[in-house]
Image (cartoon, rainbow, N blue to C red):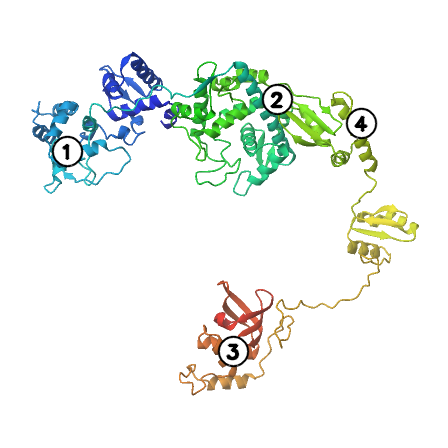
Amino acid sequence: MAPVLAELALPHLQVAEALAAMGPVPRAALADLLDVTGTEGDRELDTALETLADRALVWPDGEGLLHMAAPLRQAWDSPLGLDAPLARLLADTTSEELRRILAALGVPSPGTTKKQRLTALLAHHSDPERVAAVVASAPAATRQLLERRARHQGGQPQPQAEFIMFGTPQADSEPGVRWALERGLLVQGRYSGYGPVRIPAEVALALRGADWHAPFEPVPPVVRTASVAPAEVDREAAAAATAFAGHAASVLGACAASPPTRLKSGGVGARELSRIGKAAQCDDIVVRLVLETAYTAGLLARDGDRVAATEGYDAWAEQEPAEQVTVLFQAWRTLPLTPTQTRDTDGKALPALAGAPPCSGCVRARDGLLTAAAGLPADQGVKSPEDLGPLVAWHRPLADQLPHDATPFASLVREAELLGVIARGTLSRIGAALQAGDAEALALASRRLLPTATSTARFGADLTAVVTGTPSARLAALLDTVADREAVGTASVWRFSPGTVRRALDTGRTADAIAADLADVAVGVLPQPLSYLIHDTARTHGRVRVAPAACVIHSEEPTLLAELVAHRRLGDLGLRLLAPTVLVSRTPLEKTLAALRAVGYAPVAERADGTVRLEKSRRHRATTAALPPLPGRRRRSVPTAPRAATTGPSALAARLRSASPTPPAPDPSGTEAPYGTDTEEIVAGHAKNLTYSDVRQLAHAVDTGTAITVEYVAASGNRTIRTLSELDLDPPHLYAWCHLRDDERVFTLSRIHGVMPG
């Protein structure tokens, strides 16, 4: 249902909302609600009803009532700020409850069935005068309550109301609510229990008064217009479309030469957009517009972490400008986003080609713009592009507007102007073809407005080349190779320099070939300064050559070097004779030395300064500790095996038998020494986070040189488990070899939180 509603104009939605609020009603009642009077008003209402009927949303029955599709009612939570009609609210009410309501109203019961009594109640509440008379006789609290609820608009919070059980108001209900519930002016759901009371739509409309009407705006808003000649529209549209064609060719050419890199989060970021815009000499908005339309048209595609040109781009680049932009126009018409949107609702920058979910509201906005511009009077255009925004909002009220637009749909209007769809405030030939969805008319309009590609250039004595219109793919490729592009638009400018000519010579082309190619596309003869530049640059080109080499072999004996080049077993070295006494090798120095020595030669190595490098045997040593030693601190080598305890097994057993079964507790008074060794006392004085048993274990490891495992908390708060050996106590620090880092480290005793055997 939502896609169907999105295609409707404002008056169609207003009529649908009125029907959703009233339910099945005669056309006369609908016209009265919308305040439709006169022949013109009746015609506009009939037009709106016909539009809804064409979409199977509304239809009349045999009794003259207008019905609507059931899902359409659910499109509004509270259409016109009204609740459901009385018949729907009383669907679960019993016949006895209806009899009590009629009795309270003073209406005779027409029969004993529920249908008869409900019909009588509906007839009473559908008469605004009778409802107003009942409310006028109500207590003041009830009148205020009903008037407040009648003015309530959908979406605003309502106070929680009392509830009734089995249709009977509770004795302690608010007097105003109870009086209204007894007469059906307010309704409580039979099984809702704790739900709020609700005011029927008929009662709310009666209380709003005869002067209140639902909104109905069948006529578009009035905008300021000015006369514009068709020739002026064609001229401006042609200029815009031609400029866009040139920008598109430049942007896609830059992407084909150097594919933009995608962000890790997806899309092409600001840095790549700026690079492409600089290379193509166009704004960021134009770059985004080209990228999105080209991607939709299949000229670009994701290729890993880049966005690369496809094979379809190669065929597109060879086409005429009119054919090129026709492809991009068609892609823009159905694009499920607004390509020039640069920020989201939170103000954060948006990348291009981000792969956002399809936006149907963006498509509807584009459709609304084309429809609004097509509806302008003949030979008339809006004075300001801003005036198109209200027209778009009237034609497509459910279209999406960008949050950063200063005026409604400003970005969309700007896109249409850049493409030449809108010119001089009205629809161009291109826009009319897009609005009609006629592909043949679009191609014809593009060919009529855009000139053919230019295949010639005018070369100036100031070392520039100027191409009017859109250059052909062959001409642009030639000039891009030999010169730098300085300007793009209705006329493109390239500038020659020694660097650009050298760039062309580096591709293997000769000066004569470059001059001949330029002469083929020149209007007239090549200027003498340009010919001089090409040949002067060519004379100095290649005078110095750079060859790849991993090392150099030289000797005073040319025959020896010639022998090395011809040696079959040295073919893998990639030797090349540069001079009779100089060889270069593609293989690094050490491998070249080993290969020469393996076949019986006795080469020597040189240093970078040309002196002979002496080969000395080296003793392997471990690297020194990363931390500088403290004063009086010795450096360590790699950890050695733990030192064996000097005490024999028998002596150790005797010490264990004589030890106390429980560890001694520190003496609070300090009169006695509770520690077994001085090391224990030193460790306990600094390692405040260790238990006594951990202190003894750490001190024992220091004294005996055994390895331990500690739980250590660094200054950053990271908690790690380290295995340590080669312990050296230097309060308040412990120097040790850390097996985790494979290096010597310094540990603070106060940061050790646990000790375990190593």
As drawn, the label of residue 528 is: 4
- Element assignment for label 3: helix
Distance from disc 3 to disc 4, alpha carbons, whole Å, reads 92 Å
Task: Return the disc, 1 or 3, that comes first in the chain's sequence.
Answer: 1
Type of the residue with mark 4: Gln
Circles 4 and 1: CB distance less than 8 Å?
Answer: no
**Horizontal arrangement in the rendering, residue 557 relative to residue 495 (left or right):** right
**Earlier sequence position, callout 3 versus callout 4:** 4
Mark 2 residue element: helix
How far across and how far down the image is residue 581, in percent?
Answer: 89, 50
Residue 166 can be seen in this image: no
Element class at badge 1: helix
Residue linked to disc 3: 699
Looking at the image, tell me whether mark 4 or mark 2 is earlier in sequence order: 2
In the rendered structure, which amino acid carries the disc numbered 3?
A: Ala
The nearer-to-camera label among 4 and 2 is 4
Mark 2 vs mark 3, CA separation in Å:
86 Å
**Which of labels 2 and 3 is toward the front?**
2
Image point 44% across, 41% down: which residue?
346
Q: Quadrant of residue 155?
A: top left
